[in-house]
Amino acid sequence: MIDVMDAQVEIYRVLDVALTRQAVPPGTKGAMYCIIEYLRSSKACGGELRRAENIAIDLHRLEAALQQRNCTEIDVARHSLRAHAAALIQTRISSRGGQLKADIAVLAD
């Protein structure tokens, strides 16, 4: 079983694949559903679960837009997915920063 930090890494991998390909590859949405189910079962904070669910919705939006060749909707979906990726990276940096501060405080004592 994965922990929440590993789930964030997996989410980022899904985003990376979705944003660097011309189509949403098979298994990408399935990976997100597995992550969502894990977050639900692990009672992860609501924000993490909502973020994962919103990413899954945006993956659907991107897939539909790509199938319809709707450039405007493709851009909107990709922009939203990039925003999710940026927020995820910021969350990881912030959580690491908190841990670094705690480690420094322990070393200072």
Image (cartoon, helix red, strand yellow):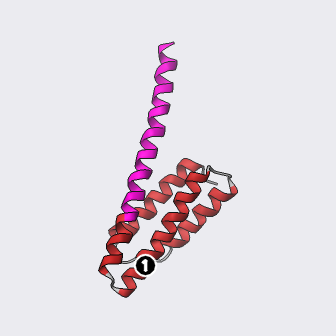
> What crowding class fits label 1: few (fewer than 14 Cα within 10 Å), some (14-19), or many (20 or more)?
many
At x 54%, y 66%, the residue is 32
In screen coordinates, is 40 left or right of 67?
A: right
Residue 22 in sight:
no
- In the rendered image, residue 18, in percent from the top left (x then y), is placed at 40, 69
- As for residue 85 lying within the magenta part, the answer is yes
- As for residue 35 lying within the magenta part, the answer is no
- In the rendered image, residue 94, in percent from the top left (x then y), is placed at 44, 39
At x 50%, y 70%, the residue is 57
Q: Which residues are magenta?
A: 80-109
Mark 1, residue position: 63
In screen coordinates, is 107 left or right of 23?
A: right
Name the outermost residue toward the left.
71
Main SS type for the magenta part?
A: helix
Looking at the image, residue 59 lies above or below residue 106:
below
At x 41%, y 49%, the residue is 89
At x 37%, y 78%, the residue is 23
Classify residue 85 by image quadrant. bottom left
| Amino acid at pointer 1 | Glu
